[in-house]
Image: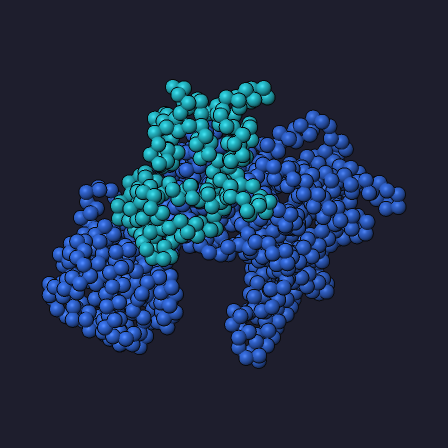
Amino acid sequence: MPVGALSHSPRGSRGFLERGLLLLVVLVFLEGIALPLGAASSPDTSARNGAAGHGQPDDHGGKLNETHEKKAFPVLKLEYAPIRMPFEISLWVLLASLMKLGFHLIPRLSGIVPESCLLIVVGLLVGGLIKLAGEEVPPVLDSKLFFLCLLPPIILDAGYFLPIRPFIENIGTILMFAVIGTLWNAFFVGGLLYAVCQIEGTHLSQVELLPCLLFGSIISAVDPVAVLAVFEEIHINELLHILVFGESLLNDAVTVVLYHLFEEYAAAGEVTVMDTFLGVIAFLIVSLGGVAVGAIYGILAAFTSRFTSHTRVIEPLFPFVYSYMAYLSAEMFHLSGIMALIACGAVMRPYVEANISHKSHTTIKYFLKMLSSVSETLIFIFLGVATVAGPHAWNWTFVSVTVILCLVSRVIGVVGLTFIINKFRIVKLTTKDQFIVAYGGLRGAIAFSLGYLLDKDHFPLRTMFLTAIITEVFFTVFVQGMTIKPLVDLLAVKKKQEAKRSINEEIHTQFLDHLLTGIEDICGHYGHHHWKDKLNRFNKTYIKKCLISGERYNEPQLIAFYHKMEFKQAIELVESGGGVKMPASVPLQVSMQNIQPKKQPPPDADRALPQFTKSREEEIRKILRSNLQKTRQRLRSYNRHTLVADPYEDGWGDYLLKKQRMVDIEKRMTQMTNYLTVPAAPSDSPTLRRTRLTSDPSAFFTKAPPGTVPTIQVELASPQSPDSVNLVDESSKKGVSAQGPGPKSGADPTKEQGRMVNPPSAGKGETGEEKEGEGKNPALLRCLSDPGPSNEDEEDEPFLS
Amino acid sequence: MGSTNSTLSKIPNVEELMRETGFSPAHIVRLYDRFESLDKEKTGHLRPEDFGAINRLATNPIGDRIIGAFFSAGQETLDFHSFVKILAHFRPAENHRLRDPSLPEPVNSRTSKLKFAFQLYDLDKDGKISRAELLQVLRSMMETQVTEEQLESIADRTIQEADLDRDDAISFEEFRKSLDRVNIDHKMSIRFLR
C-alpha cells in the first residue's frame, strides 16, 4: 500500500517509487515491442488483420518444399500466426492490469491525477511506440469490439449495484437532465456549429446542417464510463452522484435515436416534420422497449435462480449470461442496450440475492467488479492508442468552437433545467450542486466509437469530426477530470457518508414510510407513498412468491437487513481471529422446543450452508467452542449458522496468524458494545483462556432470558438482551470491586474454573448463589434449570497445533 | 376563486389558522373539503370511526397509531383546526436560512416532524421509547410470520445501537441522533401540501 510504503524509511519509499516507475517503463516497452514483433514474425507481413488465413498458403508452400528436400527435423519452431489473436488480446489485458497495479504503487500520483488520465497517457505511449516501430497501429477501438465486449461489463456493474432508492426518488430530475438536457445540448452545439461554419473565412462552408446536428448529438451525450471513472475517486455525496450518473445512463436512448435519425437522413439531406414525429415515437419505443427487454430477462434470471439451490457452482453464471443476452437482444432491435442492461440488473437483483448462496453473491460481485475494471482500463488505453492511430484532420476553428460550445451549452442547460426542476423538488438543488452537475458532464469513449461508426462516404468530414471528438474527450477527461477533485474540496461540497446504515435508520425509515402512506390516505391524496406502498404489496403477494425459492419470500425486508448486518459482523469477528461467543448446546434444544409449535420450516436453513443433522451440529459446536479463542465475553449478536460453515472451512488457516489482531478488535468492540468488559489479557495461557471460554456459555446462558435464545434459523444468542447486559455488568463489576483491574483476569477464571470443574448441578448452585445478591430474576432461575454445558475437560486442542 | 372565498368564510378563525400553520387558502379549502367528506354525519367534528372508514388506513400496519395521534389527550372528537394543525407537520419545510431565530419553531420544522413521529412510538408518553413499545411497533410492522425471538433480537439490537445513556430506552434526543443522516424534510413531507 502506498501509505505503508511512505511509512518506511526514505530509502524504502524511494525504492518503491523507483520500482514502480521501472515497472511502468518496462511494461510499456514490452507492449510496444511485442506487437510489432508479433507482426514481423508472422509469415505474412502485409495485412495485420486475420493473418492466419493468409499464412496458410505460405505454410503449405513451405511444407511442399520440405517434402522434396529433407531437412533436419525442427526441434523448436516459432509459429506465431495461429495464436496471434488470443495472444495479443491477452497481452493487452495484461498490460492494462499491470498498469493499474503500477499506478497504485506510486503513492502520490494516484492522488493528483485520476486514473483515466494516466491510462490515456499510457495508451498514447504505447501507440507512439508502435508507430515508431514502423508498424501500423491496430484499430483497437473498433466499434464492434467496444460495443459488444468492452461496454457491457461496465454498464452491468453499474446497473446491478445501482442504488435503487435514490435513483427512483430522483427519477424525475434524472430524466429531465437526460432527455431534455441531451436534446438541448445536441441542437445547441449542432446548430451553432453550423452557423459558425457558414461564416466566411473558416473554409468550412461545405459542412451541411444535418452532419452538424449528427455531430452535435454524438458529442452531447455524457459518458457513463468517464463519469464513473472520475466520480469514483472523488466520493461525492449520493445525490449528486446519482444525478450525474443516472443522467449518463439514461441519455443513451436519446443518443441512439438522434444518431440513427440523423444518420438515416443525412443522405436524404432533409428532415421533415413527419420525421421528427417519428423520431419522438422512436424515442419512446427505444427507451421503453429497452427497459422492457431488460426487465423480461431480469425476471427470467430471477426465476432461474430460484432453482439453483442444488447446483451452487454455476449459480453466478446466470446473472451474467442473462444480462448479456438482454443487451444483445436490445441491440438487435436497435433499442437502447444500456437501458436494457440497467433494467435487467436492477430487476433481478433483489430476487437473485434472496436466492443465491453467500459465496455466489461474493463471486458475482467480484467478478463483475473485475470485468468492469479491466474493461474500463482497456477503454482508456485504447482511446490513447486510437488517438495516435489517427487519421486526423485538425481544424482550429471547428475544434475550438466545439469545445467551447460544449461547455457553454452544458452550463446553460443545467442552470435552465434546474430552475424548472426546483419548482417540483422538495430538496432543492443549490448552486454548488448545479456547478458539479455541469462540470461533471464528461464525454468519453462512447462518443468516439459512435463517431468511428460513421460511414466515410456519407460523411466526408468524418476525420475532422473524429479529431474534434477526441479533443473534446481529452479536454473533459484531463482538464475537468483533474480539476474536479480540488474544486469539490474548495467548494466544500458534501461528501459521501461512509458510515453504514444502522438498523435504527432502517426501522425508522420504514416506520416513516408507513406513517406517510397513512397521512396521504387521510388527506385523500394519491401521492408518492401511496403508489410505492401499492407496488410493495403487489411485489410481496405475487412476485416474490414466484421468484424466491423456499419460504424466504415471506421474510420482511427488515429481517433480511438484520440478517445481513449480523452476518457481516460475524464474518468480521471471525476474520479478526475469533472471539466469537458460542453459547452452549442447551439454547439449541430450548429453541428447538420453541420452534416446533410454530411449524414453520426454517427460512434460512438453505441460505448459506448444507443441512446439518443435529448431532453433527453438536459436534461442530463443541469443537468450535473449544478452539475459538476468546478472551472476554462478547455481547455481540451474530449469525451462528454462517459461523459454523465459514470458519470451519475458511477461518482455520488464518486463525493462528490473526491472534495479534484480536487485541485491537477487542478495543474497538469495547467502544462499540458500550459496556464494561473484562479487558483482554493477551498473555493468558491457553488453559485460562479456555476456561473462560468454556465457562462463558454457562455464565452467559444463565443470564439470558429464554426469549432471546437463538433459533436454528438465524438469530443470535442471548447477547442483545438488555437484561443480560446488566447482569453481566453486575458480575464483572463484582469481580472488579473485589480486586483491581490487574488480577481481574485471574479472579474470574478461578471462579469460573471452579464452576467448570464441578458437575453442572453444583455449578448451578454456585451461580445461583452468586446471582442471589443481584435480585432474583425469574428468567434466570428458569435458565438455571436447564443443564449447563457439558464438561469440556476432555477437549484436547486438535486445531491449535 | 369565488368558491374558495365562500368556503373560507365558513371556517371560523381561518386567518389565525393560516398564520399558525403556514398553509395557503387553497390548501385550507382542499383540506376542508376532505374534512367534510370524512365527516359523514356532518357534525363538524371527526371521530375515530370516521377515520376507520378509510379503507386503506385499515391495512396500514400503524394505522391505529396514526388515528390515535390525531386524537391526542383522550379527546373524543376532532375539529377542523386540530385536523389542519396536525397535518401541518407534513408540510415541506421552507428554507431555513430565512427563518428568524427569535420566532417560535414552525410546526413543520425538522424537530417538530421528528417529535410527531416520536409520539407515535411513545404511546405512554413518558418521553422514551421503551423496549416493549419498540417491540410492539416491530410486531405490527412485520405482518408476516416472524418469530418472537427474531423480533426481540432486533429490538435489542436497535436499542443497543441507539441508546447512548444506557437507560435501555430511546429518548427523543437519541431518536433524533439516530436519524441524523436521514433527510427528514424529504421523508416526512407531502408534496401537495406545499
Q: Who's the residue at 33% across and 51% down the image?
A: B169
Work out whether residue A710 or residue A546 is closer to the camera in this orientation and state it.
A710
How many marks can you see?
0
Q: Who's the residue at 40% across and 49% down the image?
A: B172
Q: Position of residue B5 (x, y in %)?
A: 56, 22
- The colour applied to the residues of chain A in this rendering is blue
Work out whether residue A14 or residue B173 is closer to the camera in this orientation and state it.
B173
Work out whether residue A427 or residue A272 is closer to the camera in this orientation and state it.
A427
Quarter of the rendering containing residue A518: top left
Query: In the image, is A524 to the left or to the right of A771?
Result: right
Work out whether residue A136 or residue A255 is closer to the camera in this orientation and state it.
A255
The C terminus of chain A is located in which quarter?
A: bottom left
Q: Position of residue A145 (x, y in %)?
A: 60, 49
Identify the coloring: by chain
Rendered position, A742 above or below A412: below
Q: Who's the residue at 18% across and 53% down the image?
A: A779
Q: Position of residue A708 (x, y in %)?
A: 25, 52
Q: Who's the residue at 38% across and 31% down the image?
A: B57
Q: Residue furthest right?
A: A201
Whether residue B170 is visible, yes or no, is yes
- The colour applied to the residues of chain B in this rendering is cyan
Whether residue A607 is visible, yes or no, is no
Rendered position, A371 above or below A757: above
Rendered position, A793 above or below A397: below
Quarter of the rendering containing residue A771: bottom left
Q: Position of residue A50 (x, y in %)?
A: 63, 53
